[in-house]
Amino acid sequence: MPENISPDITEIILKRLTGTITESESRRLDDWVAADTSGRRAALLEILLDKDELTREYRQRDLAGSGQALREMQARIHIARAPLRRRRAIIAAAASVAVILCSALWYIGRDTSLTPPPVAATGTSSAVSPATIKPGITKAVLWQSSGTAIPLGANDPIASGNNFPASRQDICLTSPEELCLEVPRGGEFKIILEDSTVVWLNSESTLRYPETFTPGERRVEVTGEAYFAVRKDENRPFYVEHNGLEIKVYGTTFNVRSYPDDDNSYTTLESGSISLRKPGRQSAEIHLSPGHQAIFNKEDSTLTMTTVNPEVITGWRHGRFVFEGQTLLTIMQDLARWYNFKFEFTDPALATIKFNGNIPRYADFNTAITILENCGDISFGISGNKVTISQLK
């Protein structure tokens, strides 16, 4: 009978698989393997660390079905050159850990710290050079109405009013004007507006706003994706315009997503209260409660409501990509914006595969695609800055 693997060892194996293991945890795992004189633990670990073997044998696209995953792994894992009795024991143990392997997509990144963890490559077959495809960094360009462009980085936070980086004070105007903060592919940025409202901008996003808000209202315009923590001011309502919609904010936290290549735009309320309407029309306001999402169809201008988990939607702000039933196309679009690469599918049907899971936002690209490869029937090929997604043969 195969032994039960303790939760702490399982967690360490997951960290070894995803490249987040520490030196002390590595020693603990080595000691655990060495304590087994039968060699079963060593054989099991070898199987679990063989990405190609697991990927070939593990055909699990809906990761929520752990029972089905267990049955598939028990039925399909093949251990070469192992005696039959030993093979059965290893398969049973490998199956139980493989279920947890795909659960690692949920486990990884639960720490909401924005500090990138030290992540090592995990042996994916794709020959990825770290210098070729890297995770994004804090960067943006601040455009003034005069046409002046101010490049900004991690050491150049934008704070309220005229408080621009001291090294660039000479080109900043003192009178109110419209500004545009542009975050390119492979970037992210946090800005504190004049009223102390905080806005986090995701890759390939822009925020248009005045240097100083008027006494009667506060109004900004966003494209791409942004997370707002709006400071309440009953005398100056806060408005966000995006993709033909106007959001009225009553002091709250919420997420807006409206990329050009998305069929819909999404407004997700985390806390507080907001309402939506089409600007310039005498249409009624639609109010959202926390945990609800408004979906605006760009083609027919219809607006629908749904209930969501805000933590899934705002995972990018907390250092992780979280997916619940997203297609591989959507996942690759998000990864491409953050890691700044181009991609294509060898078979268009692959774009419709749906995943549930969690990928560390600051992981190296090798780790990100290894997680997807381990839990889907796909493989990645990389040439320069182009990624090709194929069906696993």
Image (cartoon, helix red, strand yellow):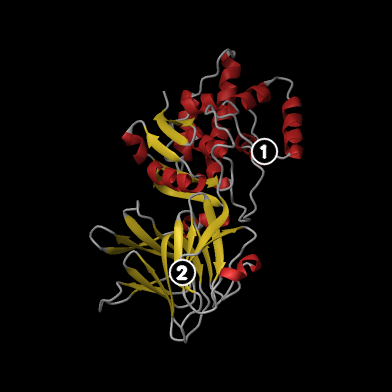
Residue drawn where x is 75% and y is 35% of the image: 28
Residue drawn where x is 51% and y is 75% of the image: 211
Image spot of residue 268 (x, y percent): 42, 64
Residue drawn where x is 54% and y is 74% of the image: 173
Image: 296 above or below 378: below
Residue 104 or residue 237, whichever sits in front: 237
The tag on residue 12 is: 1
Q: Quadrant of the N terminus?
A: top right
Residue 167 or residue 387, whichever sits in front: 167
Tell me if residue 1 can be seen: no
Q: CA distance from mark 1 to mark 2?
A: 55 Å
Label 1 crowd (10 A; few <14 / some 14-19 / many >=20):
some
Residue 182 placement, left or right of 27: left
Residue 26 placement, left or right of 182: right
The tag on residue 146 is: 2
The tag on residue 53 is: none
Q: Amino acid at mark 2?
A: Ser
Image: 54 above or below 139: above
User: Are dots 1 and 2 in contact, CB under 8 Å?
Assistant: no
Quadrant in the rendering for residue 171: bottom right
Element at label 1:
helix
Q: Amino acid at mark 1?
A: Ile
Image spot of residue 348 (x, y percent): 32, 35
Label 2 crowd (10 A; few <14 / some 14-19 / many >=20):
few
Residue 62 placement, left or right of 165: left
Image: 362 above or below 389: below
Mark 1 and mark 2 lie on one chain; the one further toward the N terminus is: 1
Quadrant in the rendering for residue 345: top left
